């Protein structure tokens, strides 16, 4: 009989509850005992995601968001959960990061087009097709790289991710060079 802590429904329910909690209170400063309990639940959930053949990217994304928001105070500094869960296998799947990038890019483009099309009676919102805005794409890609550095992904992994996204989005040479310079700067800053 599967463990209740590890069942797929339990994982999905846990991440739905977590997402709702974050929406209501985005930055949670927990007491030590509550932090430790939350860390235990995150670890159990991530262990289940890592073991499962079908990776739960939606649940992992919620955990990622929460792990950068939930913290405890250690002296005068906050200590975030992400510092304890960055080593799980799910974060080493290029497909996880690509899925996250494309979902966020689609949301940004939809929001932008919804704003742009408010006064346009002939908007093609029903078709769901949008031309990629290279500026928005480049900014989100730089943000994604920053997040990958924060989650301690190796440089080669980040470069592979960027190469794949650049190939798919057809960013201009100056945008790609700016991104490469930004990656180098972030990596140097991280290792100082």
Image (tube, rainbow, N blue to C red):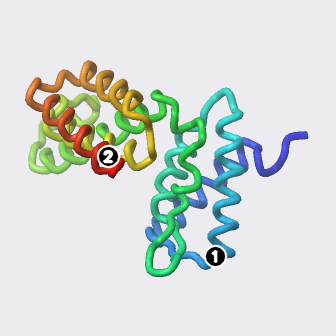
The answer to which of 73 and 141 lies nearer the viewer is: 73
User: For residue 126, what is the image quadrant?
Assistant: top left
Answer whether residue 109 is visible to the viewer in this image.
no
Residue 190 x/y as whole percent: 34, 49
- Counting residues from the N terminus, which is met first, the one under dot 1 or under dot 2? 1
Left or right, 17 with reference to 146: right
Residue at horizontal 58 percent and vertical 51 percent from the top: 85
Q: Which residue appears at 46% of the width and 64% of the height?
A: 69
Q: Quadrant of the N terminus?
A: top right
Q: Which residue is mark 2?
A: 146
Neighbours of disc 1 within 10 Å: few (<14), some (14-19), many (20+): few
Residue 172, image x and y in percent?
11, 25
Side of 98 where 75 appears, left or right: right
Left or right of 147, for residue 3: right
Give the left or right position of residue 133, taking residue 79 as reference. Answer: left
Q: Which mark is residue 88?
A: none
Give the residue at the far right of this rendering: 1
Label 2's element? helix
Q: Check disc 1 and report the residue beneath it.
A: 32
Q: Residue at x 19, y 46 (%)?
A: 112
- Estimate the x, y position of residue 56 in percent, counting from the top left: 59, 37
Seen in the picture, residue 60 relative to 19 is either above or below; the reply is above
Q: Is residue 172 visible?
A: yes
């Amino acid at each position: 009989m599967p463990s209740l802590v590890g069942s797929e429904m339990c994982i999905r329910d846990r991440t739905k509850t977590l997402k709702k909690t974050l929406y209501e209170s985005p930055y949670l400063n927990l007491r030590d005992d509550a932090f430790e309990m939350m860390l235990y639940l995150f670890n159990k959930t991530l262990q289940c995601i890592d073991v499962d053949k079908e990776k739960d990217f939606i649940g992992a994304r919620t955990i990622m968001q929460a792990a950068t928001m939930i913290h405890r105070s250690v002296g005068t500094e906050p200590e975030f959960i992400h510092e304890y869960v960055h080593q799980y296998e799910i974060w080493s799947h290029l497909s996880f990061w690509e899925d996250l990038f494309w979902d966020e890019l689609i949301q940004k483009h939809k929001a932008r087009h919804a704003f742009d099309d408010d006064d346009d009676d002939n908007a093609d919102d029903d078709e769901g097709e949008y031309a990629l805005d290279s500026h928005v794409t480049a900014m989100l890609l730089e943000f994604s790289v920053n997040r990958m550095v924060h989650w301690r992904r190796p440089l080669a992994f980040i470069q592979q991710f960027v190469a794949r996204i650049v190939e798919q989005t057809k960013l201009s040479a100056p945008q790609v060079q700016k991104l490469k310079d930004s990656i180098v700067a972030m990596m140097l800053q991280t290792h100082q």
